Image (cartoon, rainbow, N blue to C red):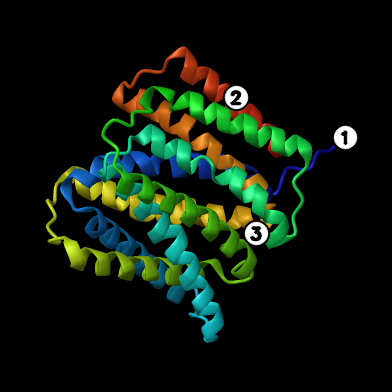
Amino acid sequence: MTTTAPRPDTVLIALAPAAFVFLWSTGFLGVKLGLPYAEPFTFLGIRFAITTAILFAFALASGVRIPAQPTRVGHAMAAGAMLHFVYIGGVLGALLHGVSAGVVALVVGLQPLITAALVGRVLGERVRAVQWAGLVLGFIGVALVVYAKLAVADATVLGFGYCALGLAGITAGTLYQKRFCAGDDLRSNLVIQLGTAAALCFVCAGFGETFAVTWTGEFVFALLWLAIVVSIGAFTLLMVLLRRGAAARVTSMFYLTPPTTALLGWALFDERLGPLALSGMALAVTGVALVNR
């Protein structure tokens, strides 16, 4: 009896969700490592500019050209503004205005639930009862994981506004990408998205920042990690997953980001993991399994 080995592309697709969760989770650690050495929009602008240059060179080498149709370019710019500028800028703004990392994770953790509530009207997708149960269970799991970091004493109204803005950006951007950019070449699409985000970040930096950067080894490592591994690797995987699966199923994987980040913090920075956080991790994994069953 002979067996057929799985095709390499099938194996890669099967590994894509786990790879996405891991790479996406490292983004929070990269920000923690690099942000002390540069102002937020300066930091983001340099990050996105590096990513844009790398992707543009790769697209040219691959024979891919920027779309000539203004509508396609406009859709990519809109998706990039929401996914990269509004979402990431909102999260950083919230953290810089006193909102704790736990509260930010909890608020942004509402994204899969909001997405599930909107996919029927926006994308015509149906969310089954068992998937709703998984989404609720996953959110409870995230709440337990970040419970120890749910401090609000130093938070400001502006900080919570940034937090809500980040939630709106990742939710709207995901739905917009799925509806209007699903057929575009990923390389040219990401060049436009990240180029748009870089331009917006530098404009914002020009209004309130000095563009001062302390070029340390830690900063360079964090910058390159975020620019290459997260902005290229994680976002490419997200786009691939959105093309191949329902939006509610794909976004449910965001529930696994806080548990993975907590595990990385425990492994790299000796951060404590209590019974509550471990229980939340189990609930989050169970919830995502139910959504994707």
Q: Which residue is drawn at 57% across and 64% down?
A: 176
Q: Which residue is drawn at 53% across and 74% down?
A: 75
Residue 7, how many percent across, how many down?
A: 70, 49
Q: Nearer the viewer, mark 1 or mark 3?
A: 3
Q: Amino acid under label 3?
A: Arg
Q: Earlier in the sequence, mark 2 or mark 1?
A: 1
Question: Does the residue at mark 1 contact the one at mark 3 (Cβ under 8 Å)?
Answer: no
Residue 34: image quadrant is top left
**Please, what secondary structure does the residue beneath circle 2 have?**
helix
Q: Residue at x 18, y 62 (%)?
A: 208
Q: Quadrant of the N terminus?
A: top right
How many C-alpha atoms fall within 10 Å of the one at disc 3: few (<14), some, or many (≥20)?
A: some
Horizontal relation, residue 231 to residue 244: left or right: left
Q: Which of marks 1 and 3 is nearer the N terminus?
A: 1
Residue 86, how many percent across, how many down?
A: 40, 58
Q: Nearer the viewer, mark 2 or mark 3?
A: 2
Tell me the number on the disc at residue 283. Answer: 2
Residue 212, how many percent across, how many down?
A: 12, 58
Tell me the number on the disc at residue 1. Answer: 1
**Does residue 122 show up?**
yes
List the residue tagged with mark 3. 243
Marks 2/1: CA–CA distance: 41 Å
The foreground one among 115 and 257 is: 115
**Please, what secondary structure does the residue beneath circle 1 have?**
loop
Q: Earlier in the sequence, mark 2 or mark 3?
A: 3
Q: Amino acid under label 1?
A: Met
143, above or below 252, in the image: above
